Image (cartoon, rainbow, N blue to C red):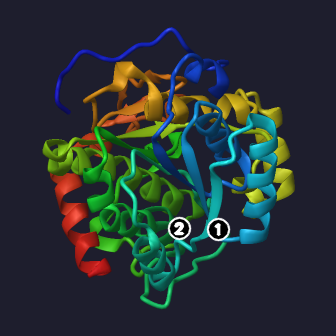
Amino acid sequence: MTSHDRITTPFGATSTAAEVVAGIDLGGKRAIVTGGSSGIGVETARELARAGAAVTLAVRDTEAGIRTAADIITSTGNKQVDVSQLDLSSRESVAAFVEDWKDPLDILVNNAGIMALPELELTAGGWELQFATNHIGHFALTVGLHGALAAADAARIVSLSSRGHLRSPVVFEDINFSSRPYDPWLAYGQSKTANILLAVEATRRWAADGITANAVHPGAIAETNLSRHMDAKALAALRASGQFTFKSTEQGAATSVLLATSPQLEGIGGRYFEDCNEAEPVDPATELPASGVAAYALDPENARRLWELTLEVVG
C-alpha cells in the first residue's frame, strides 16, 4: 500500500448526503447512478439532483426508476432526472446503455449490487453471479464510458464496495468456486474487493485524462434491497448482535456523495473511504475488523491483474 496523507473531513458516520453536499453547485454537470431506484441509490441521486446535476438513474426495473425519478423531481425541483434500463449481469444491456450515452459524464456512481446469494449461481459465461454483477458489469460500464468521462472536466468515479471486502481477496485461481466450496460471504467479499481494485487501476490508467476513482463502504443500512437474499432470522440476529450500527439511507449515501462532489477530493483517487473519511489500513488475517481497508484491496499488482483479466472477459 502506498503511503500518503490520509484524507479526513468534518463529516462522520451520522452525516447525511444532504449535509455533505450543502453549498456545492453541480449545475451543468451530468451524473449516472446505477441502482438508483432503491436504497442508498435513491438518496445519492436525490442529493446530486438537489445540487443541480442532471442525473440518470441506470436501473434494471424501469417502472421503479420512473417512480423514483418523479419523486426526486418533486422533492428537489430539478427536472433533469431521467431513467435508462441497465442490467449489469447482461453484457448486451451494458453495451446498449453505453451506446446510447452521448454526453460528457462528470460523475459515475457504480452503486448497484447483489449480496450473499445463498447458492452458487453462474452467468451464461460461467462467472459467479455476485462477481459478474458487482464487478464485471460495472467494469464493462466504466470502461465503455471512458470517452464520456474523459470529455468532462475532472470526472469522478465512485465505486461502491463494502466492509465485506475484508472477508476475501480476489481469489484469481478460483473466482467461480469451481474447486472450493461455495460460500455466499466469500463470494460477496471478493466482488467487493474487486470494486476497490477497479478504483485503484482506473485512477492509475486514467488520471492523465482527468478521471479519478475512489471506493466506498457506505455502512450497514437498515432498509435496503441489498439484504433481500439473506435469511430473515439471520438478518434479525445480525441486527440484535450489536455488531453493526445501522444507518439510514440518507446517512448511507453520504460517503458516496462526498466522493462525488467534495472539493477536498479533487485530483484524489485510488483510495477507500468509510463514514466520510479515508479508511485506516487493517489486517483481516487474524480476525474480521469492524472497519478499515485490507492491503490486498489497494495492491497495485492485484489491481492491474484484475483489470487485464476483466478486459479479456468483456472483450
The one nearer the camera, 133 or 287, is: 133
* For residue 60, above or below residue 249: below
Q: Position of residue 211 (x, y in %)?
A: 26, 44
Q: In this figure, which residue is indicated by the disc labeled 1?
A: 117
State the quadrant of the C terminus. Answer: bottom left
Quadrant containing the N terminus in the rendered view: top left
Mark 1: secondary structure: loop
Query: Foreground residue, 287 or 188?
Result: 188
Image point (75%, 45%), residue name: 73
User: Mark 1 or 2 closer to N-term?
Assistant: 1
Measured along the vertical axis of the image, is residue 123 above or below residue 26?
Answer: below
Amino acid tagged 1: Leu
- In three-dimensional space, the C-alpha distance between marks 1 and 2, rounded to whole angstroms, equals 7 Å
Q: Tell me if 184 is positioned left or right of 173 in this view.
A: right
Which residue is painted at 38% across and 21% down in the image?
263
**Label 2, residues with CA under 10 Å away: few <14, some 14-19, many ≥20:** many
Which type of secondary structure does the marked residue at label 2 adopt?
helix
Q: Which of the 4 image quarters holds residue 46?
A: top right
Between 108 and 104, the residue placed more toward the observer is 104
Residue 49: where, in percent of width, then height? 62, 39
Q: Nearer the viewer, residue 19 or 124?
A: 19
Q: Residue 44 location, x and y as percent?
A: 62, 40
What residue lies at 47% left-to-right and 85% top-to-bottom?
92
Amino acid type, mark 2: Gln
Asked if residue 300 shows in the view, the reply is no
Query: Which quadrant holds residue 310?
Result: bottom left
Q: Is residue 252 above or below residue 155?
A: above
Q: Nearer the viewer, mark 1 or mark 2?
A: 2
Name the outermost residue toward the top.
10
Which residue corresponds to mark 2?
130
